Structures are given as structure tokens and as C-alpha cells.
Image (cartoon, helix red, strand yellow):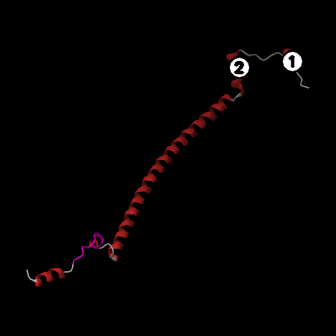
Amino acid sequence: MSTRSRTRRSIKPAVAQPTIYQWAGIFRPKTLALFVLLGLVLTTGLSVVLTTHQNRFAFNELQELRERANGLEVEWGQLLLEQSTFGVEGRIELKAVEQLQMVIPELSSIIMVRHE
């Protein structure tokens, strides 16, 4: 081998391998803007999915609460009807006479007690 061929080999500049970021072109403004836009679109899509999911659960809970409110309203109406039925004086007197065999005492057997 001659000296001339040795010098040619040693003079060759070493080619630096590009990094993956340089190869992908991430540091170029257009590519960087595209990645930022892609991230924003992905974030927005996931937030829409999350909001829809939360709205469905809230709507289901609202429907359950409305059904419970309707049931309580029906029960309240039944209790009011029962109260008005049992509160009638004639009914109380009738039940006292029929079931408990109570009678109205004579005036002579009534004793008045005074509290002093």
C-alpha cells in the first residue's frame, strides 16, 4: 500500500449519524406545530368522551331521582287520604262503640277534678 492511499483513507470525514429526532424532523416548525395540533385534537376528543360519559351517568341518576320523587308523592297522597279517613269524628266514635264497647257515661257518674 502506498502512502497516498493511506492518506486518502484517513482524510475521509466521519459522517455523523442523525438522531431519531433529526431524522423525524421534530424540531422543524411545521412538524412541531403538527404534533402540537395532534395532541390538542386528541385531548379535545378524550374530553368530549369523558363529558358524554358523565352526562349519561348524571341523566340516569336524574331519572332514578324523578322515579323516587313520584313514588314519594304517591305515598304522601295515600297518607293524606288515610289521615283524613281516620280523623273523622264519627268514625272514631263508631270504632270506640263497636270494637271497644265504650258508652257515653251518664252525667251523674261524671266527676270533675280541679287542679289547683
Residue under label 1:
111
Occupied quadrant, residue 78: top right
Residue 5: percent from left, percent from top: 11, 82
Occupied quadrant, residue 36: bottom left
Closer to the N terminus: mark 2 or mark 1?
Answer: 2
Quarter the N terminus occupies: bottom left
Residue 4 vs residue 87: left or right? left
- For the residue pair 61 and 50, the one nearer the viewer reads as 50
Q: Magenta region, mostly helix, strand or loop?
A: loop
- For the residue pair 38 and 54, the one nearer the viewer reads as 38
**What residue is at 67 percent from the left and 17 percent from the top?**
99
Residue 82: percent from left, percent from top: 63, 31
Residue under label 2:
96
* Crowd tier of the residue under label 1, counting other residues whose Cα lies within 10 Å: few below 14, some 14–19, many 20 or above: few
Between the residue at mark 2 and the residue at mark 1, the CA separation in whole angstroms equals: 21 Å
Residue 29: percent from left, percent from top: 35, 77
**What residue is at 72 percent from the left and 22 percent from the top?**
93
- 17 lies above or below 69: below
Q: Is residue 16 magenta?
A: yes
Mark 1 residue type: Ile
What range of the chain is rendered magenta?
14-22
